[in-house]
Amino acid sequence: MKKLQVSGRARLLLLSLAVSAPAVLAGCGLGQLMSAPWIPDADNDNVVFLGDSIFALSGDIQKAIHIEAGGTFRNYTTSGAELEGGVITPSIRGQFELAESANPNSRIVVMDGGGNDILIPTIALADPYDCKTQWYEFGRLSQSCRDYIDDIYVDGADLLNDMAASGVTDIVYLGYYYTKAGLLGADDLDEAVDYGDQILATACSNSVVDCSFVDPRPVVTNADVKSDGVHPTTSGSNKIAGLIWAELEPRL
Amino acid sequence: MLGRRGRMWVLLASGALLVAGAIPLFRGGVAPVAAVGASQPASAAPGEAPRRSRGEAPGRTEKDQAGELVAHLARTAAALEHEEETKRRELLDVDPTLPLEAQQSAFLDRLSAAGGVDPRAPDAHLVRSQATELFLRLEPVQARLAAMPVDERRAALAGIRRRMGYSEEMIARKAAEDVYRDARWENGHAYMKARAELFSRLEQGEALEAELRSLRERYFGHEAPTIAREEDAGFFRFQRRRVLGRN
């Protein structure tokens, strides 16, 4: 069976078109146009959510957690966010800085980050780091992808330590589940996801903050991933929310 | 460790060894799961399933056929990997003799053709940062930047970002990050030098550990435990590759 071929530009358009209408009204950045509305003032301002479109595109993970908690938490998650980079979309670090400037009382951070650093070059820039593991690589992730991801480790560990220096005491860090073949061309990334989760978990445990890494791989299946191959369906969001809540609730 | 896909192929290859010649073989599919005759190696375009050859040589055992299958699979895999690597080299090779501006222009032209997105386009916000990082990671680009005096390098980095479509505000922000990172690396290199001096002066033991703790705290403050954990795992962040303008 021939794979569906979608050009890099078309993939970006698909990503851009995955817009929820209410979110269009929410902010001025491109990433915000594709994101659930930010919540700068919540019922519990001590908890702040930072991250990328896994959280932000539908907002369903946070909605499910709000139901469990019986109240809202602050939210700055933004579609397209990278850990450090990004031109228009605020990076995860940029989101934290925005959250701190609005209210410097963030004590608990729930976040993800690092996925777009791998996904964007892979699907839109012809996979320059060889992070896709094709069948003929027999499960071996390339050294160039490992080296690239190692830099993401340092970015992640530094970010978590900087959060600790700003007064954050607890972090719940959501890792990534396996993507699947879909409109965004994010297939063949299992090995990169495995290595990425390994280094993000290491950044979490090596940091000076009390950081708990949440691994969604065992519970999020292909059926929980939308046809774009990347974002969670409602069932996926609910599963992820359950994993996060189990770590977040005892910290509240 | 093998990922899901890797494990799948190991299983398939193992299965093929067991049943080679005993079941009808696949035609089509995205990967070559097929047996081939030794006398007539099947030909297939990269990514296309090799065809089973007709007319098996007499006297060949199942073991022979299985061996041929594995060998064919390995050859096809190597050819496809080579083809992919060649494409990647074509994308990422820049002429080290060209000035930075010309290197960037050639690189972006090729990247636009290969990826279908031109990071310089006004609406290409999502890829601009990653395309810039990719360019900065290229060896000839780093060699040029590393050879420049600091002020010239900062101007060159601003030029790269400007040509990539960054706003002046973003260029200024990135320049501030560069200054911060330069200081981090300078501090890190000074620490590594002091660390080596400690190791040359003291034997392994509690005294060395105590001195190391104190040294890390002096150089890294609240981040010292992270550096210690990394070292325990054999990772030395200031010995990894420096990518000027990126890390």
Image (cartoon, coloured by chain):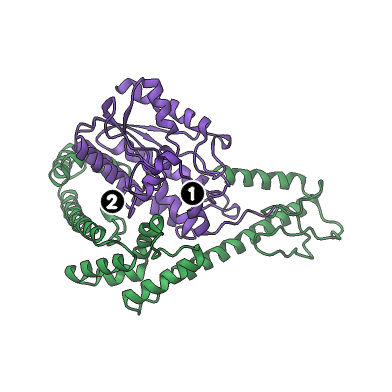
Query: Up-down: is B59 above or below A193?
Result: below
Q: Amino acid at mark 2?
A: Arg
User: Could you tell me how many numbered marks the image carries?
Assistant: 2
Chain to which the residue tagged by mark 1 belongs:
A
Residue B119 position within the rendered picture, expressed as x and y whole percent measured from the top left: 40, 63
Can I make out residue A119 in this image? Answer: yes
Q: Residue furthest bottom?
A: B97
Question: Callout 2: 10 Å neighbours few (<14), some, many (20+)?
Answer: some
Q: Which mark is residue A17?
A: 1
Query: Up-down: is B122 above or below A112?
Result: below
Quadrant into which the C terminus of chain A falls: top left
Q: Which mark is residue A231?
A: none
Question: Which chain is green in the rendering?
Answer: B
Residue drawn at (48%, 28%) of the image: A238
Residue A17 position within the rendered picture, expressed as x and y whole percent measured from the top left: 48, 49
Q: Which residue is mark 2?
A: B237
